[in-house]
Each structure stands twice: as C-alpha cells, then as structure tokens.
Amino acid sequence: MVGQKRKATLKDVAAAAGVHESTVSRSLNPEKRNLVNAETRELVQRVADELRYRPDRVASSLRRGRTNVIGVVVADLGNSFISPVLRGIENALSGRWVMPLMAESRDSPDRLARVCEALVDRRVDAIIATAGRTGDLSTLREVAAQVPLVLAVRALPRLDVATVAHDDVLGGRLAAEHLVELGHQRLASLVGPDDISSFRHRRRGFWEAADAAGLEVLEISDTTVLPTVDEGRRLMELLLDEHADQLPTAVFVHNDAMAVGAVDAARQAGLVCPDDISIIGYNDSPLTAYLAPPLTTVHLPAYELGRLAADTVIGILDEPDVTPHTVTLPPRLVVRESTAPPSR
C-alpha cells in the first residue's frame, strides 16, 4: 500500500546495532538471552524498541514444531480460588512468549470432553487441566495420548501424568487440630463432592485427626455435586435439622464458598458464629478476611501452584522423555474470627 511504512526486520536491527543477526535473535529470545552479555542485550533491545521491531513468533514456533499456545481448562470461572491459579499460569507462560488459551468445563463431563477436543484441534502444545473428576478419567487419558497433559489442583491417581496439587490430607488435619485445640468436643463436617480428589483428601485428613483426638465427626445423610454457596447453605440446614438434639459446636466446611452458605444458614437458624458455633472453611479465597465474621480457613498457595503447573508443562515440552512426577504444596492454617472456644 502506498505510504505504508515498511516493517522493521531482524536484519535492520542488526545493522543499526552493529551486531550479527544471530546476536539479535538470541538477545530477543527469553530462552537464549543469557548467552549474550548484558551490555549487548540492552543495546539490541533499545534499537529494537526504536525501530518498533517485533519478532515473528508464529514463524519461530512453526520452525520448532510448536504453536506456543497452552490450553488451560478450569471447572468454574466463578470460583474465586481459581483466579490466582490462572494468574500464576499466565505470568509463568508470558515470560516465555507462550499464550494460555482458557476454557471452562462447568464441572460437566460432556463439556470437558468437548473443550479438550477443541483445544487439541487448535493444536495447542499442551493442556493444563484443573477440572478433573473421577468420571473424567477416560476423557483425560485420551487427551494425554494426544498432547502433553498436566493436572493442577485436582489429582487423578490412576492417570499417569504430571500433577501439581496441594496436600489436602494435611489441610483437613490442620482444620481438625485447630478445633480440638480450642476445646471443641462435638465436631461436624460438610463434605464436598466425593469424586474430586481434593475434597476426598480433606475429609480423610479431618477424620484422621479427629479420631486421633478420640472424637467422632457428625455428618449428614446427603452430599453435594457442586461446592457452591447455595449448597453450603442447604447442607448446613440439613446438619442443624438432623442433629437438632445435640448440635455440633464446630463445623469444618470443605471450601470457602460452602462455608459462606453455612454461616448464613446458621445465622438464619438463630445461631451466632462463633459464639454458638464455630465454622472453618478451606482455600483462603479472596475476601474471606472481610466477611462477618472473618473466616478461619486453610490457605492454599494458589498462585504458586499455577506457576509450578506452567513450569512443569514447559519442562515436559522441552524434555518429553522425562518421567511424570507429582508436586505437592503444603497448606497452612489462617485463624480469624469465625472460630473460638466452645461457649459454656
């Protein structure tokens, strides 16, 4: 087009900087820039900025047989816990000029299969999945046979792929030990979906610690499929109804969203938290410190998990023959005002 300014090339940058073209290429490549001394790197970057040079990432990725796009599948975008996980993934990938392509399964097996198929069709280099449930095993096995797959947040023990998750058994144990230390004798648990590994492990850790203290854990006759605020409210109402003759003095709720619903149900029943009943959540989601009362919870390093998941997938792409491994991050207890010693 007449009057259109020609796009600067790598050769133009090399000529203006007075260096070889290969030096420009290495200086502007995040994976190879350490091979060039700092003074030269700064010169090349300054000249490239002045000329408004932009490397052809598509051509570069095609030469390497990659698209530089990683698929990321999450269960629920409305879950505030997932935001820092995604930020950790994005920050780790962007430093390597890799773009995440995000999709939501809505915790539906059919939708998970469809979004994974769509990502594979778009030739993503790999997929990070945070949405796996027990029933999704065959789908994720098929995905892993086509592209590198990394599980994050939720593990599937029968799937031999790299996994980055939290030690939820320890997290459940921390919750129980905290309530026992406060002097509670009648504990209850509002469990999350049993086909999600993280919720299963939280329940196990809580029960083991309660049993070690010589205490039983009250549960209810119903379970939940989706760990939401509404479900937390419904399960708390059932708990208060089924154990009306001997109410628990403390309740462990398996995630913060459900805990919000549980606190509301207790309030509607005329119970004051924590004066009448202590409630502890899980995840340390954003804003839990600003609830009324501020929620005692188990903190999970979500950002770090996302960053490690991204590092893991890049490592697999660089070295495909490396044996899959599992990274487990430790949780920690965050004590706030929703738990207190039982009222006398």
Image (spheres, grey):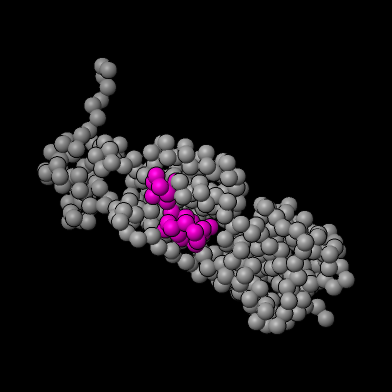
> What are the residue bounds of the magenta stretch?
143-165
- Taking the spot 57% from the left edge, 54% from the top edge, the residue there is 134
Considering every residue shown, the one lying at the far right of the view is: 245
Q: Relative to residue 195, is residue 315 drawn left or right?
A: left
Identify the residue shown where x is 26% and y is 43%. 64
Is residue 268 shown in magenta?
no
Q: Which corner quadrant holds the N terminus?
A: top left
Image point (16%, 36%), residue name: 11
Q: Position of residue 246 (x, y in %)?
A: 85, 73
Left or right: 280 as drawn, with respect to 116: right
Estimate the x, y position of residue 214 in percent, counting from the top left.
70, 83
Note whether 34 is above or below 108 in the view shown.
Answer: below
Residue 4 seen in this snapshot:
yes
156 drawn magenta:
yes
**Location of residue 253 (image quadrant):** bottom right
59 or 214, which is in the foreground?
Answer: 214
Q: At 46% from the left edge and 50% from the top edge, which residue is drawn?
A: 141
Q: Quadrant of residue 186?
A: bottom right
Q: Is residue 82 left or right of residue 206?
A: left
Q: Nearer the viewer, residue 136 or 80?
A: 136
Corner quadrant of residue 288: bottom right
Measuring from the top left, give residue 25's x and y in whole percent.
20, 44
